Image (cartoon, rainbow, N blue to C red):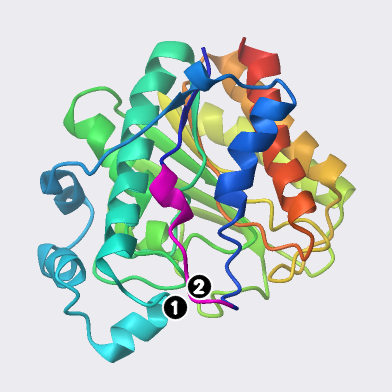
Amino acid sequence: MLKIAFHPIYKHPLPEGHRFPMEKYDLLPQQLMYEGTCKPINFFEPQIPNNKHFFSVHDPDYFFDLLHLRLSQKAARKIGFPLSDALIEREMIIADGTMKASEFALQYGIAMNIAGGTHHAFSNRGEAFCLLNDQAIGAKYLQNNHLATKILIVDLDVHQGNGTAEIFQNDETIFTFSMHGKSNYPFQKEKSDLDIALENSTNDETYLTILKKTLPKLIYQENPDFIYYLCGVDVIESDKLGKLSLTIGGCKERDRFVIQTCFDHKIPIMCSMGGGYSPDIKTIVEAHANTFCLAQEIYF
């Protein structure tokens, strides 16, 4: 059974006019139910986890400054969100969703988080709408509980996973792979274990050719027993914050290849949705919904 983390607090409201499209977190479950991809039984509600899970990834001083809203103005500006207790609670619940979805992935082969993909959160700071790095927290949760040994993080958001790269820069048990727009944010990149920086306007054919050559080779080389997939749809040509030129069909084929490859190799996969900023919310929801449809089609 496909299990999907969703909590009403994912929809935490932001000041009017903020560019981050929070409405997709409400519309996506509705769309999945409407089209028959999912039923209520597919969804589970994560909660606020024990603080100890954050300390495997984040500096305790940073975490408690965040929790008690003590970040400096400069640090808060880098995050981009107005800080509030509700926002911190939301981020903690998202991380719990990824941890619990990771366990479901071990049971069923695949699991999803409607939110997540907070890959710009560093060990000691947040930036670009990311406060706590959900997939990094999930990865260490699995390892600390002896549920996985070697983990591969496949980050195909249009933006480099700079926070994830920094967190695991000295950790040989977690391999970070980021394929992203060369001239997209962050403008000063960190060093992942493998970075593939794509030129502006990279199309479906070029993108998929590179991915299909790279991922199987990485799986053979690293032999992971668990994969995290950050499947941002900001690679689509219409995206306001991206500079690549994939079609919705190309984005769907990207997801099909990653998910099918994990299925064929019998490697559990946990998917966090990541970014999507097209002007038309319907485009964002359709592109994200495709990922869930493929999970159902391939695994169930």
At x 47% / y 72%, what residue is drawn?
Answer: 128
Could one spot residue 43 in this view of the protein? Answer: yes
Badge 2 crowding class, 10 Å Cα cut-off, few under 14, some 14 to 19, many 20 or more, is some
Left or right: 145 in relation to 160: left
Are the residues at dot 2 and dot 1 in contact (C-beta closer than 8 Å)?
no
Horizontal and vertical percent position of residue 271: 52, 36
The numbered mark, 2 or 1, whose residue comes first in the sequence reads: 1
Q: Amino acid at mark 2?
A: Lys
Q: Amino acid at mark 1?
A: Gly
At x 23% / y 44%, what residue is drawn?
Answer: 48
> Mark 1 — residue?
80
Numbered disc 1: secondary structure = loop
Horizontal and vertical percent position of residue 287: 74, 44
Q: Which residues are magenta?
A: 8-16
Left or right: 156 in relation to 130: right
Which mark, by number, is residue 189? 2
In this rendering, the answer to whether 91 lies above or below 103 is below
40 or 271: which is nearer to us? 40
Residue 199 found in image quarter: bottom right
Horizontal and vertical percent position of residue 160: 55, 63
Real-space CA distance between mark 2 and mark 1, rounded to the nearest whole angstrom: 19 Å
- Mark 2 vs mark 1, foreground winner is 1
The quadrant of the image that shows the C terminus is top right
Could one spot residue 213 in this view of the protein? Answer: no
At x 15% / y 72%, what residue is drawn?
Answer: 65
At x 77% / y 66%, what residue is drawn?
Answer: 279
67 or 202: which is nearer to us? 67
107 or 244: which is nearer to us? 107
In this rendering, the answer to whether 219 lies above or below 12 is above
